[in-house]
Every structure is written in C-alpha cells, then in structure tokens.
Image (cartoon, rainbow, N blue to C red):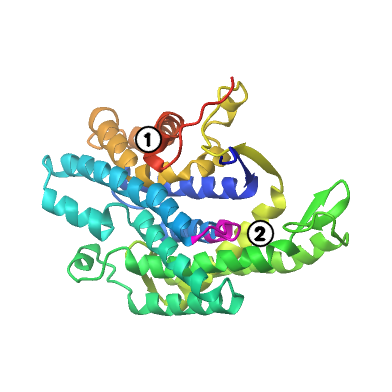
Amino acid sequence: MDNPLQIRMNSLDILRGWCMIAILFFHSQMYYFGTDVVPYTLYVPNALALFYFISGFLAYREQQPVKTAMKRIALRLIMPYFIFATSISIVKMLIYFGTIDFRVLGSMVLSGRASWFVAALIIIELLFLVVRKITQDNTWGILLVALISVVGSYFLQRSPVIDTNFENGIPFALPPALVGLFFYCIGFLYHRHMLPCIPKPTSMGYVQRDGDEHRQLPSRAFTITYSWLIPTLVLFLIVKLFEAQKGYGFLFASLYADPFALFILDMLLGCVGISSLLLLLWQDTYMVEQDNSLKSKKESIYWFMSPAWIGMHCMVFYFFSGGVPLVVAFVLKKYVFSPDHHNTWCFDMGFWFTFLAVIVITSTIAWVIYRYLPFLLGRKVRVYDK
C-alpha cells in the first residue's frame, strides 16, 4: 500500500508558486495589452529555467525502477498533456477562428505546440531515465550529458519569428527540451553536492540541509554560504542590467537566444542564486497527503492561492496558464474594459483586475481537479477521515 504522506520542501513550493505567478502575469498582459509591457526577457526565461531546475532537484530522491518511472511519466505527464492540451487548444481555436480544424489541432498537439513546456518536460523526463540508467547516477556522466544537451540546443535554435518555426521538421518542443535537460541535470547535481552545504538551523545548532541531521556545522556556516551567495546574486543583477542596456532578447519557447552564452549564464546564475536564497529563508519541511488537495480545514482557506499552494499544484497551472488568461482577457476587454473607451486609466487598471481574476479562476480549476478529478493527473482518489 502506498504511503499517503510525503515530505515537501516549503522553499521549493514557494519558489515554484512565484514562478507560476510570473507566467500568469506574462500571459495576462500579452492577451490584455497585446504586448509584453514588462519585457519577457526580464523574468519569464528565468522562471521557466527554474521549473526545470527544481524538477531535476526533486528527481534526486526518486530512485524508481524504469518500468515504474515510465508508468508515472505516462500517467502524470503524457495522459494529462493529451487531455488538457487538446481541450485548451479547441477553446483557443474557437475564440480565434470560430471553428475547429482537426488537422491543425492534431499537428499542434503532436508537435508539442499545444503546451510546449509540458511537452518539453515529457522529453526531459524520458531522456533523463536513459541517462540515469547509463551513468548509474555518476556525477561526471550526468555533467557530460548536461554539456552535450546545452551544446545541442545551441545548434537547434530557431528563428525569433514564431511562424517560421513550424515549417521545418524538428518537433517544436525539442530545442527547449534540450536546454531544459541542462538545467534539469544541474538541479540534480545541485541537490547532491550543494544542498548539504547549505545550513539548516535547529535546536541542536546548524546541521546539514540534506543528510545526517546529527552532523552539526560550525556557527559560521551562514557566513560561509552568504560569502558565495551574495556575489552570485549581484552578478545575476549585473547580467540583467547589461542585457537590458544592450537590448538583448531571449525566447525560451522556440529557444532563440543571442548571445547564447549570456543566456545560459543568466539562467544558471538565477537558478543557483534564487533557489539557494529561498532554501536559506524557508528551511521548513512538512508532511502532506500525496494528492496535495485542499483539505476541509479552516486554516486551509487562508492558504488557498498562496505561492506555496500554487507551487504544490503547479501541474494544472502549467496547462491553463495560457488558456485562462486568453479567455478572461477576451471577455473583460469585450464587455467591461474595452480599449475603445476614451478612459485610458480605466483600461490600464482593468489589467490588474484581469490578472487577479486569472489567478482566482486558475486556482479554482486546480482545486477542483486535484480534489475531485485527480485521475486526470494520474493520481488515485483517496478517502480521508474527517
């Protein structure tokens, strides 16, 4: 019988939650204003890289047989992808064209365009299964794969003009999957080699963040950690300012990055620096039910839609992060905040109402699915004592 409890790291849930909020913000402004008022390059690629980095981080503890892992990928990624990506693509086609072209629909879903991020994650998970089998989790072997994948992604970059990317035969999700595999491997190695060095305060003193809880660290452990963490974050900010000054732009979806080395440096500094900072700020772990659904407890009401809650349920958010902003912006712009009105201030303020509505609606959808339709995500329906 499966253990109904699992250990979660609050810092990672919070980080994934804020990354998901950033994605919702980007899609909301794109569908509402028709452009990225806050530049895409400023934060979206970093949020996407962090998602892959955290997935690799969490994969370190999962030592499942290949058959079990394949079943898990099929039920929790591939099946939901076909269900949700197809449904959302139908809604988008009806809004844009008023009809459904099943040939185009099939092409979008099979090529990964319907939900490129999840399609890329499926490719990454399958590739990493092979990598772990071949390397036997050897650090140098995984690092070599990471380097090969990032070099391969460099040669598979696409045009910044999205429409031209559909003309060649390379699956749309493959280029971002290769660069995503790089960050996935780095997250895996970070968990193995760097996480034990990040101190965790307890009543006994400073102990290893991951490993033997009885192995105490010196009181200067925080000072040592911040001695490399602060320069990392400062360098990250300098890189961001340099990119803004030069006007560089990166596109993660079709993987267009010029200069490519600066793109990788930016994403790498962001993954290591931001995740390390969050691990220092929120050290606690806690036990939750495996279905991660909202329980009928009074205090859970205040937790609903918090960054930690969104991070726990981010799989559904991945699928609806494009569809819900599209529908909400379409409805509100048509019936409430019309851009034809002369009151520009009212139209601009309407964006924040749209963004809030997107978070509320997407969170509600996630709650319903995790609570009542978990089989859509390959999860079992569990009965809990009230």
What residue sits 30% from the left and 42% below the top?
A: 323
Residue 354 is tagged as: 1
Locate the C terminus by quadrant: top right
Q: Which residues are magenta?
A: 56-65
Q: Amino acid at mark 2?
A: Ser
Element assignment for label 2: helix
Give the structural element (helix, strand or loop) at label 1.
helix
Q: Is 105 left, or right, of 3 in this rendering?
A: left
Residue at 39% over, 32% down: 373
Q: What's the residue at 12%, 48% (across, down)?
A: 102
Which residue is situated farthest in the front direction here? 1
Observer-nearest of 41 and 323: 323
In the displayed structure, 320 sits above or below 341; it is below
Residue 64 on the magenta span = yes
Q: Counting residues from the N terminus, which is met first, the one under dot 1 or under dot 2?
A: 2
Q: Nearer the viewer, mark 1 or mark 2?
A: 2
The dot on residue 276 is 2
The percent position of residue 92, horizontal first and vertical second, equals 22, 43
Asked whether the viewer can see residue 314, the reply is yes
Number of marks in the image?
A: 2
80, above or below 155, in the image: above
